[in-house]
Image (spheres, coloured by chain):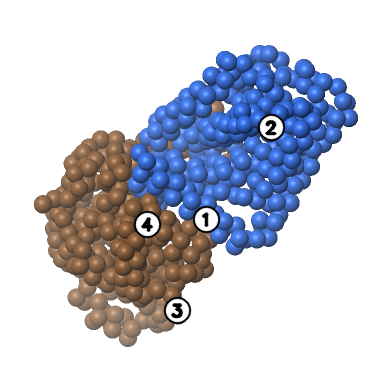
Amino acid sequence: MSIISVDQLSKQFAYYNKEVGLKSSIRNLFKRETLYKDAVKQVSFVVEEGEMVGFLGPNGAGKTTTLKMLSGILYPTAGKVSVMGYTPWERKKEFKRQFAIVMGQKNQLWWDLPANESFHLNKTIYEVEDGVFRKTVEELSELLDVTKLMNVQVRRLSLGERMKLELIAALLHKPKVIFLDEPTIGLDIISQKKIRDFFKYYNQQHKLTVILTSHYMNDIQDLCKRTIIINDGKVAYDGDLARVNDLLNQKKIVKIKLSDVVEEGVLLRYGDMKQYELTEAVLEIDRDEVKAILKQMLDDLPIIDFTIEDLPIEDGIAILYRKGEQP
Amino acid sequence: MRKTLHRYAVIYHLFLKNSLIYMMEYRVNFMFGVLVEIGFLAIKLSYVYVVFRIGTDLNGLSPHNILLFIGTFTIMAGLYSALFFFNFNRFPELIRSGDLDIYVTKPVSLQFFTTLRMIDISFAVPNVIGGIVMVVIGWQNSGISASIGHIAGFVLFIGIGVVLTYCIFLLPQLLAFWTVRTNGINDISNGLYDFNQMPMQIYHPYIQKAGTFLLPVFLTTNYSPMVALDRLGPVEWIWGIVSPILFLIIVRLLWKLALRNYTSASS
């Protein structure tokens, strides 16, 4: 049974341009030309109960705006949404009691107080019973390994610790649906993994429906079978993550630093050139050939440092479009 | 209804508790807050000094009557600073930064949550104590009987004054949903409020009418001493009771309208 259904959802924002300098500021004081940006364009999809769906897309693609409409923060320009049978932007209290949103760059915990004070406030706001509250805090704090941090001022915690406590605050009322907007942004790899493991476990135990946006492919890979790729406000792909993952992983990015200048033409023999600056270069190389080609490069070139990275999501999406097909 | 009120009372109690914990965490800041307010109180006392120095009646009000007005204004300024100032000041920033996002998703009135969340006692202590002292001195020397009717009327209009102060100062903040910054209009409302430093009777009747019926700034601090001095007529009594209800409804409706304009901020 679908718990979230989104039909032709669109959002347009009004804005105005401001050129550099005082002159344009003075001009803007009297006359501003209103421009419009379509942040989300006719997005449609359905999410089943207990499903974990990954929202993937470059910066400014419309992921967060979509989540904000699904959680009732923003009114859409057009379209219909049903989350647990509610229209989010009607902001009914019953709806709010059953979902949560966590944003990696925004806090709900009181900055100068220990987290447990904020938990008590949430307990009262969501009318969580004493026994349930105690049990939930105990369970979640043990799972996330933050039991000792409950009485520490939030501002004194590390980013990772803070995010774990933010998650507890968001899950205290046992929501049926949670929207996670970049929950691991800025965290180190170990903290990212801990949070992913936690959600994997929590989803199995509580059948929580999750929509997750992230820049980190690992977040989506670990948690979501299904992914929705949003690009330029539109759904570019909706389906099995494994297939899109294959496409995104067909290429690798190899960054090299050289001790001496090597001509661009020489480097082009090893792969597609993405960037060249005399002693530094970025090459795109087929995944299957990376090992062999890199070995060759190390033998041939005066390389002093190198890294191998995944293709940026933006480039992966461009490949999808170049192929002119839905993967 | 009773359950809802009880729930909101408990949440407000937690706001107060959290604010106190916050204040005690920054005790030096708290002490400086108190000191600054004592400074402002001293400035208000200079008005009292001038009034007593001149020693003449103003529109039938003796210096001790005027002390009653200034004392009430001082109490109200303390209550405004403690209950609303910090929240209202911070409100446009919540909109500008998009921090309002999380609050919107809470199953509690957003207006309640954002406009009453912080309580800063440091602002209230000197003003409320100083104001009460002035009121007691003015009351006694004006020969007002300490009857239940007088005291209840005085306290009732302090309560009404708090409600109206909330409405009058929140109204310009709502513009932030459209304009994001509201400093300009805030200065106007603060300026209007300062008209209350002296009894409304000293102003031109047109200003009195505008400040009573159009934007009832005078009601916030003038009606309490007027009740004590038996200077409140039936029309003023009715308007005094009706206006806070009316303005609460106006603020609520505008709040709902303004919230539709919330565009959040980029993440």
On-image quarter of the N terminus of chain B? top left
Q: Secondary structure at mark 1?
A: helix
Query: Nearer the viewer's eye, disc 4 or disc 2?
Result: 2
Mark sitting on residue B152:
none
Real-space Cα separation, disc 1 to disc 3, in angstroms: 65 Å
Which chain does the brown colour mark? Answer: A
Real-space Cα separation, disc 2 to disc 3, in angstroms: 95 Å
Real-space Cα separation, disc 1 to disc 2, in angstroms: 34 Å
On whether disc 1 and disc 2 are found on a single subunit, the reply is yes
Real-space Cα separation, disc 4 to disc 2, in angstroms: 45 Å
Amino acid, disc 1: Lys
Query: Given contact means CB atoms under 8 Å apart, are the residues at marks 1 and 2 in contact?
Result: no
Amino acid, disc 2: Ala
What residue does disc 3 label?
A260
What residue does disc 1 label?
B17
Q: Residues within 10 Å of mark 1 (few under 14, many from 20)?
A: some
Q: Residues within 10 Å of mark 2 (few under 14, many from 20)?
A: few
What residue does disc 4 label?
A123
Amino acid, disc 4: Lys
